[in-house]
């Protein structure tokens, strides 16, 4: 069956652009009518839609200019009473226990022992803050501030973020989601130095116009920012993903725990399930099926995707040797059991790959859309290390050489480990961090001027963008406009929420009701529920201890 996206990704992106422009016009009209809160929500929905539905550009000058206008109409701050004078303030949209995004932040803080580091969360929505992040901030002498407890209004959150910046924050580092409008409204022309951490370098994002510097995590992201976001090299510096020294692990114990034979050649791949979404013939399973069938000694475990559909079928066909195991808590046993690590396909998982490499596990990555793009595990420490392949046959040959050659595994794994340690572990990583803090301060005006030179891509619709559109569609990330707007309903005024609910397709309306609760209320309810659950668990443990004592 013909796929309308893969048949014409350029036309699909053009349709996305029309939808995006419509939301921008909605925001512009709302500003003209002094409906500033509604305008902020429209801008965030536009950026959210563009994040998941590539619109043929990687940023929008008009969107950020409208955000700056909203910054001139902020309501009074609610005054949370937190002052972060002299702190490095890390701003996140949300902090998660899983994935590499939040892990990057707490590892940064752990490595930066010379400064006080605090965290501001713009939309945590009652999600428990990972204890590793809380511990790192506490050890640094900082604080965690959740703006979701202030109000459901994005403008009030922006006002509070501005107030925090004006209490004397030394540097503000933006780790925000690509759609998060709060910093772009609240941090216009503030005195604190602003660093934008470009962790989502492969997609559309907002926030560059308020930044004094963009910290790119890899060369491919820096190259795209210069070419497509029109950032001059002077506004960019490379800051690799920080890692920590891995704990000692026993391979035999790990394999026993996972039920894997001691003499197997164990290959692992770790990523969120959506990163394996690909069209038929280009799927991770299609690429590795014949290899696994030809090598009965191989066990290939894929951590992330659910074990259903095609994953269940390939598990049955290979007798469970190629198997997806879903998301798991605690990956150490898998890393310890591994002989080889292969990257997710078609979208790389750089942090997971680096976590394997730092343990001395040889790593391989295939990207048939081109090596060293932002869809791959491009990284300073991996360049020239025989890690990346764009040809499937060459990739399989390299995988076979590692599978059949234990000496080659040790040689390649150690060579890559040394290179990764040099760039990603302290004290080597701190060398890169010092460059971020020691670079001459640049005014946000010059950053905005650099971004404003063009609002369209500089070299037309590229092969990378075709691959990005195809990936977003095949992985299920692409979503209709009503779904993107629904995610922002908790920030809307009540009558805007009601109108939006009526526009949701009837088959989805019941499920949409959960988005009708104002975000501040929803956050407080989730936090109270989490506290009650924690108290119930503690009470249950005390009861069990008492019962056990009496039974003795």
Image (cartoon, grey):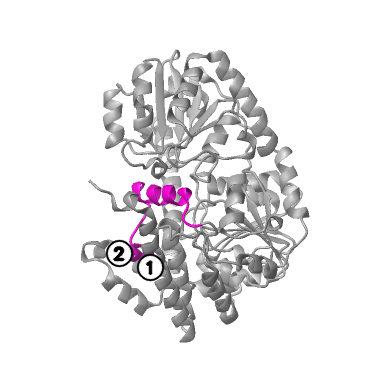
- Residue at 46% x, 83% y is 35
Q: Is residue 476 magenta?
A: yes
Decide whether residue 148 is among the magenta residues.
no
What is the quadrant of the C terminus in the image? top left
**Does the image show residue 83?**
yes
Position in image of residue 58 (x %, y %): 51, 59
Over which residues does the magenta segment extend? 460-486
For marks 1 and 2, give the one nearer the viewer.
1
Q: Residue at label 1?
A: 19
Where residue 382 appears, as percent x and y from the top left, is: 61, 34
Helix, strand or loop for disc 1? helix
The residue furthest front is 459
| Mark 1 burial class by Cα count in 10 Å: few <14, some 14-19, many 20+ | some
Which disc, if any, is residue 512?
Answer: 2
- Of 212 and 533, nearer the camera is 212
Please state the horizontal and vertical placement of residue 193, each as a whole percent of the image: 71, 63
What residue sits 40% from the left and 68% below the top?
A: 490
Label 2 Cα neighbours within 10 Å, binned few <14 / some 14-19 / many ≥20: some
Residue at the location (38% across, 27% down)? 288
Q: Closest to the observer: 378 or 548?
A: 378
Q: Is residue 258 left or right of residue 198?
A: left
Judged left or right of residue 400, residue 9 is left
């Amino acid at each position: 069956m013909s796929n309308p996206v893969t048949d014409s990704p350029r036309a699909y992106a053009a349709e996305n652009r029309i939808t995006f422009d419509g939301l921008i016009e909605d925001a512009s009209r709302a500003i003209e009518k002094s409906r500033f809160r509604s305008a902020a929500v429209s801008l965030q929905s536009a950026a959210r839609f563009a994040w998941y539905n590539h619109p043929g550009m990687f940023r929008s000058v008009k969107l950020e200019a409208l955000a700056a206008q909203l910054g001139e109409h902020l309501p009074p701050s609610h005054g949370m009473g937190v002052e972060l004078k002299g702190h490095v303030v890390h701003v996140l949209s949300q902090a998660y226990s899983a994935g590499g995004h939040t892990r990057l932040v707490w590892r940064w803080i752990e490595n930066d022992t010379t400064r006080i580091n605090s965290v501001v969360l713009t939309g945590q929505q009652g999600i428990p803050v990972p204890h590793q992040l809380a511990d790192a901030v506490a050890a640094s002498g900082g604080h965690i501030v959740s703006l979701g407890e202030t109000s459901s209004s994005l403008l009030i959150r922006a006002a509070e973020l501005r107030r925090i910046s004006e209490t004397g924050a030394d540097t503000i580092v933006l780790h925000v989601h690509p759609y998060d409008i709060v910093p772009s409204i609240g941090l216009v022309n503030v005195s604190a130095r602003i660093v934008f951490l470009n962790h989502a370098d492969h997609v559309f994002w907002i926030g560059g116009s308020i930044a004094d510097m963009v910290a790119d995590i890899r060369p491919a992201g820096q190259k795209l920012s210069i070419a497509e976001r029109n950032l001059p090299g002077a506004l960019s510096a490379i800051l690799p993903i920080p890692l920590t020294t891995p704990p000692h692990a026993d391979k035999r114990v790990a394999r026993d725990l996972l039920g894997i034979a001691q003499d197997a050649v164990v290959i692992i791949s770790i990523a969120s399930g959506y990163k394996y979404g690909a069209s038929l013939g280009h799927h991770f399973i299609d690429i590795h099926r014949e290899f696994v069938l030809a090598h009965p000694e191989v066990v290939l475990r894929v951590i992330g995707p659910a074990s259903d559909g095609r994953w269940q079928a390939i598990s049955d066909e290979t007798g469970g040797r190629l198997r997806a195991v879903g998301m798991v808590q605690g990956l150490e046993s898998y890393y310890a059991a591994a002989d080889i690590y292969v990257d997710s396909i078609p979208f790389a998982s750089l942090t997971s790959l680096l976590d394997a490499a730092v343990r001395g596990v040889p790593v391989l990555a295939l990207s048939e859309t081109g090596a060293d793009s932002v869809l791959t595990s491009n990284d300073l420490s991996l360049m020239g290390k025989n890690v990346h392949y764009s040809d499937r046959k060459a990739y399989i040959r390299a995988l076979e050489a590692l599978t059949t050659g234990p000496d080659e595994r040790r040689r390649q794994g150690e060579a890559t480990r040394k290179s990764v340690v040099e760039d990603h572990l302290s004290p080597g990583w701190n060398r890169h961090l010092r460059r971020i803090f020691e670079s001459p301060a640049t005014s946000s005006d010059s950053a905005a001027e650099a971004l404003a030179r063009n609002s369209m891509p500089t070299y037309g619709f590229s092969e990378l963008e075709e691959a990005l559109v195809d990936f977003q569609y095949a992985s299920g990330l692409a979503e209709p406009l009503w779904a993107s707007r629904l995610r922002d309903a908790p920030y809307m005024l009540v009558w805007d929420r009601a109108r939006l609910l009526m526009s949701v397709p009837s088959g989805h309306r019941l499920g949409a009701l959960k988005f009708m609760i104002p975000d501040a209320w929803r956050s407080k309810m989730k936090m109270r529920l989490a506290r009650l659950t924690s108290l119930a668990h503690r009470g249950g443990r005390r009861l069990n201890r008492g019962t056990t004592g009496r039974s003795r």
